[in-house]
Amino acid sequence: MTTEPVDLNAALKTFDELWSPRIAARINDYDVRVTHVAGSYVWHVHDTTDEFFLVLDGQLSIALRDPDERVVSLTPGCVFVVPRGVYHRPFSDGGASIVVIDPAGTPTTGDSHDAIPDHIKTHTGVPLED
């Protein structure tokens, strides 16, 4: 990790892949990840950790099963925390750029998930290129 400021907008310009977060910073044992999103992600759950979302541009919706199914919609500047143990599925019809904060090493598809479509790859974040 760098000891210099990280411009998140510049970081987002270094890659085009969707649902493939780059690790922009680390705070204690948490990764600050930036990513582009469009379309639907997979229903998944993080059993032992909350998941933080911040929208930088576009609109992100998150379907939740807590216990009834509902959807929260986030616009630029909005944050939302999905509580641990809650199944969720982020999606964005028009595309968005977001920040996600998870404990380092947390798989993007959680501890349990539905079948993973071809456009989604499970990983724990890709280091941001300098």
Image: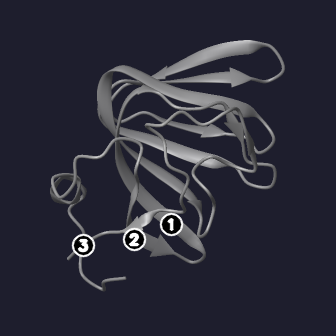
Rendering quarter of residue 68: top right
Between label 3 and label 2, give the one nearer the viewer: 3
Q: Which of disc 1 and disc 2 is earlier in sequence?
A: 2
Q: Residues within 10 Å of mark 3 (few under 14, many from 20)?
A: few
Q: Name the spot of residue 103 as percent of width and height, x first.
A: 62, 65
Looking at the image, is mark 1 or mark 3 nearer the viewer? 3
- Image coordinates of residue 25 in percent, x first then y, are 39, 71
Q: Amino acid at mark 3?
A: Glu
Near mark 1 (Cα within 10 A), the count class, few <14, some 14-19 or many ≥20, is many
N-term-proximal mark, 3 vs 2: 2
Could you tell me residue 70's position as x and y percent?
Answer: 67, 13
Q: In the image, what residue type sits under mark 1? A: Asp
Tag 2: amino acid: Ala
| Rendering coords of residue 27 (x, y %) | 50, 73
Q: Would you name the residue on which mark 2 appears?
A: 25
* Residue highlighted by disc 1: 31
Q: Is residue 130 above or below residue 20?
A: below
Residue reaching furthest front? 118
Going 52% across and 31% down the picture, which residue do you hit?
41
Pointer 3 and pointer 2: residues touching (CB < 8 Å)? no
Q: How far apart in space, not on screen, are marks 2 and 1 (Cα)?
A: 6 Å
Relative placement, left or right, of 73 versus 15 is right
Task: Write the residue at 15% across / 58% down.
Answer: 10
Label 3, on which residue? 129
What SS does tag 1 mark? strand
Q: Are marks 2 and 1 in contact (CB under 8 Å)?
A: yes
